[in-house]
Image (cartoon, helix red, strand yellow):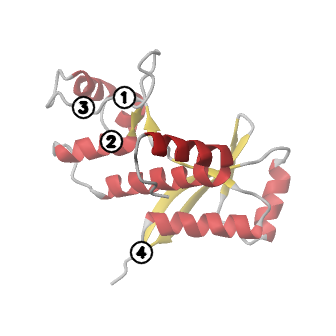
């Protein structure tokens, strides 16, 4: 039996030189009226709550609808895989102090995932996928769908980056070759 679930996600648009009114009109004309249009620092994004059997197919169907029915391309999906300790706390409904103690090792098993970025700056960033995997491994959370959804969004964002950059494609091929890794793409 295929059960439908509701998924919340945001799609970030490549949106140079467009106004809110034009974007709204194009979405209405394309019968994509379930999107909530938002803008932050000149970047437009569309918030959705859509039903589907799984997150990957639901997001892919939405991207294909938008890109086939409008002149817009999707550049990435939110929520991002890159998170701060404050965002980890928010997503898991924990206090910032609790998360900081797990990160520092003063609580828990002491093997919190290493930061993904920011080690030489003030703010550290982690992979949400790694964090959720760890929380599952140490039995702090039990909802495996958090991991599967995080992995889906991470994979989709990698695919969107790969699709949109010929230079990135070439660089990845060179790096994989030098690392003696068989191309997976």
| Residue contact at pointers 2 and 4, CB within 8 angstroms | no
**Residue 154 percent coordinates (x, y):** 46, 50
Q: Residue furthest bottom?
A: 1
Q: Is residue 128 above or below residue 72?
A: above
**Marks 2/4: CA–CA distance:** 27 Å
For marks 4 and 1, the one nearer the N-term is 4
* Secondary structure state at the residue bearing disc 3: loop
Q: Which mark is residue 115?
A: 1
Q: Which mark is residue 51?
A: none
**Marks 3/1: CA–CA distance:** 9 Å
**Marks 4/1: CA–CA distance:** 35 Å
Quadrant of the image for the N terminus? bottom left
Q: Nearer the viewer, residue 36 or 83?
A: 83
**Residue 18 percent coordinates (x, y):** 84, 48
For marks 2 and 3, the one nearer the N-term is 3
Q: Nearer the viewer, residue 14 or 86?
A: 14
Q: Residues within 10 Å of mark 4 (few under 14, many from 20)?
A: few
Q: Nearer the viewer, mark 2 or mark 4?
A: 2
For marks 1 and 2, the one nearer the N-term is 1
* Secondary structure state at the residue bearing disc 1: loop
Give the residue at x 52% y 50%. 158
Give the residue at x 14% y 31%. 109
* Side (left or right) of 144 relative to 23: left
Q: What residue is disc 3 on?
A: 112
Residue 165 visible within the image? no
Q: What residue is disc 4 on?
A: 4
For marks 2 and 4, the one nearer the N-term is 4
Q: Nearer the viewer, mark 4 or mark 1?
A: 1
* Secondary structure state at the residue bearing disc 4: loop
**Residue 61 percent coordinates (x, y):** 58, 70
Q: Which mark is residue 130?
A: 2
């Amino acid at each position: 039996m295929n059960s439908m679930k509701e998924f919340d996600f945001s799609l970030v648009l490549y949106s140079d030189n467009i106004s809110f009114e034009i974007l709204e009109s194009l979405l209405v004309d394309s019968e994509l009226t379930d999107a909530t249009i938002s803008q932050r620092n000149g970047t437009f994004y569309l918030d959705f709550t859509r039903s589907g059997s799984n997150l990957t197919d639901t997001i892919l169907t939405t991207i294909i609808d938008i890109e086939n029915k409008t002149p817009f391309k999707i550049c990435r999906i939110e929520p991002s895989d890159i998170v701060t300790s404050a965002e980890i706390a928010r997503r898991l409904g924990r206090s910032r102090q609790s998360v900081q103690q797990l990160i520092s090792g003063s609580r828990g098993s002491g093997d919190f995932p290493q930061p993904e970025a920011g080690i030489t700056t003030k703010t550290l960033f982690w992979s949400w996928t790694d964090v959720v995997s760890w929380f599952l491994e140490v039995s702090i959370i039990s909802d495996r769908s958090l991991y599967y959804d995080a992995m889906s969004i991470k994979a989709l964002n990698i695919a969107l980056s790969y699709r949109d950059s010929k230079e990135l494609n070439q660089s990845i091929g060179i790096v994989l070759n030098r690392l003696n890794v068989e191309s997976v793409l």
